[in-house]
Amino acid sequence: MSEHSYMNQLVETRLNTWEHSKALLDTAADEKRELSAEEESEWTRMSADLDRLDEQITNKRQAIDAAMRADEARAGYEALVTPAETRAAAEAEVPDDDETLLRAVLSGEIRSYEFKRARVAAEYRDVTTGSTGAPRSTDFYNQITEAMAAVGPMLQTSTIIETDVVNDLQLPRSTADSTAAIISEAAGAAESDPTFGAFITLGNYRLGFLTQVSEQMLDSNGVDLVGFLARQSGRALGTKLNALATVGTGSSQNNGIVTASTAAVTSATGTSGAFTAENLIDLFYAVNSIYRNNSAGWMMRDSSIGAVRKLRAGGSAAGNGDFLFQPGMTAATADQLLGFPLYANNDVVAPATSAKSVIFGDLSTYFIRHGAFRFESSRDYAFNAGLITYRAILDQDSNLVDQSGAVKHFVGAGS
């Protein structure tokens, strides 16, 4: 079975599972009752199956994307170099590629190195191993960013600014647009300038961690050192960055999108902060229509998405309205809530009293700024154990640039 056939089978299985789970709710609705204990157990099992299939589809899609990038890299490299240049690269004693640079850092040949996104064609060097000219699926920088995006959606939905310096970056914040008016015949147009509020400043909060590799791993050419270190670094840095970009307090750290969002809907008292279908519909329309665009979406944690799957426009599972949730029809499309993408982010808190558990709006108005990935190493830190310690560092900050209501949240009622 081909990769794409298997992917299509996973998507079809997921859609069938959703239809079966929906049928349980439809039966209860037709009989004007809540789910029985047996039906509730069956619903829970199928919901878990949906989550498992979600993970399989995501993993398979990433594998297919990596293979496609490898083919593109090979074609790009072959178009850029002549046969003579290819032979010269293969015969070079010290090839200038990511794996060689990483090994040089770990062995102490160079103290540190900053990996940046390739910006010019000459930097296609990153797609070859140097000794054989064989293509690599993607360079070290991109493998790190892919691993970072895999642990949370913030790097997928936000506007990303990559900078080489760590100075403060000021972004203008518009508070009012220019206003057009009818111009009378032979009259001039009146001036109407946009108004700007205080600048949003993206500073520099440093993320970092230490990890260790054995000397044997460094000395073995058969080990995918680039892939191993990229996964370790991406997951560690991405997990922290996603948390800060989601619920950072804004005090000596990132101002998270949930923290910076505007309050719009509050649950009824006595509900322990749980949302209803009406709450989500109210939140949807609380966001101005200019922000309900191609960049708009919902964000909540997995357990909240499980609750959303039961909601109908008419109220509870026993209601007769349409389901608010609709599964993505292909592996490349996200699930939808009221027609807009629904992103799972487990750094958003669960529904509870005074908890901001759901956000909706133009997620691209949240900006994440980061620099290059810097790596440093020490053979002395764990010399006796035969381990090489390396430190990964990322300078970053993030904030909601449009704080006039582009992103709003639902909050549980106070006690």
Image (spheres, grey):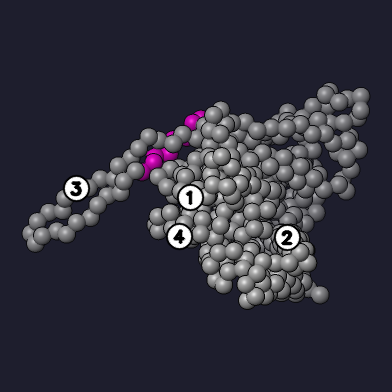
Location of the C terminus (image quadrant): top right
- Labels 4 and 1: the sequence-earlier one: 1
Classify 10 Å Cα crowding around label 2: few (below 14), some (14-19), many (20 and above). Answer: some
Q: Residues within 10 Å of mark 3 (few under 14, many from 20)?
A: few
For the residue pair 300 and 210, the one nearer the viewer reads as: 300
Q: Amino acid at mark 3?
A: Glu
Name the residue type under label 1.
Val
* Mark 2 vs mark 3: in front: 2
Q: Secondary structure at mark 1?
A: strand
Q: Earlier in the sequence, mark 2 or mark 4?
A: 2
Q: Which residue is mark 1?
A: 265
Which label lies toward us, 2 or 4? 2
Give the residue pinned by disc 4.
293
- Judge the density around disc 1: few (<14), some (14-19), many (≥20) Cα neighbours within 10 Å: many
Q: Residue beneath label 2, please? A: 51
Query: Measuring 40% from the left and 45% from the top, which residue is drawn there?
Result: 404
Q: Residue furthest left?
A: 186
Indicate which disc, 2 or 1, sits on the residue closer to the N terminus: 2
| Spatial CA span between label 4 and label 1 | 20 Å
Q: In the rendered structure, which disc, 1 or 3, sits on the residue that comes first in sequence?
A: 3
Answer with the quarter of the image where residue 72 lies: bottom right
State if disc 4 and disc 3 touch (CB < 8 Å).
Answer: no
Badge 3 or badge 4: first in the primary sequence: 3
Of callouts 2 and 3, the N-terminal one = 2
Q: How busy is the neighbourhood of tag 4: few (under 14 within 10 Å), some, or many (20 plus)? A: few
Q: x, y (%) of residue 188?
A: 12, 54
Instruction: Using the image, tell me which numbered label, if any, was put on residue 302.
Output: none
Report the residue marked by disc 3.
Answer: 191
Which residue is drawn at the image coordinates 47% and 45% (left, top)? 263
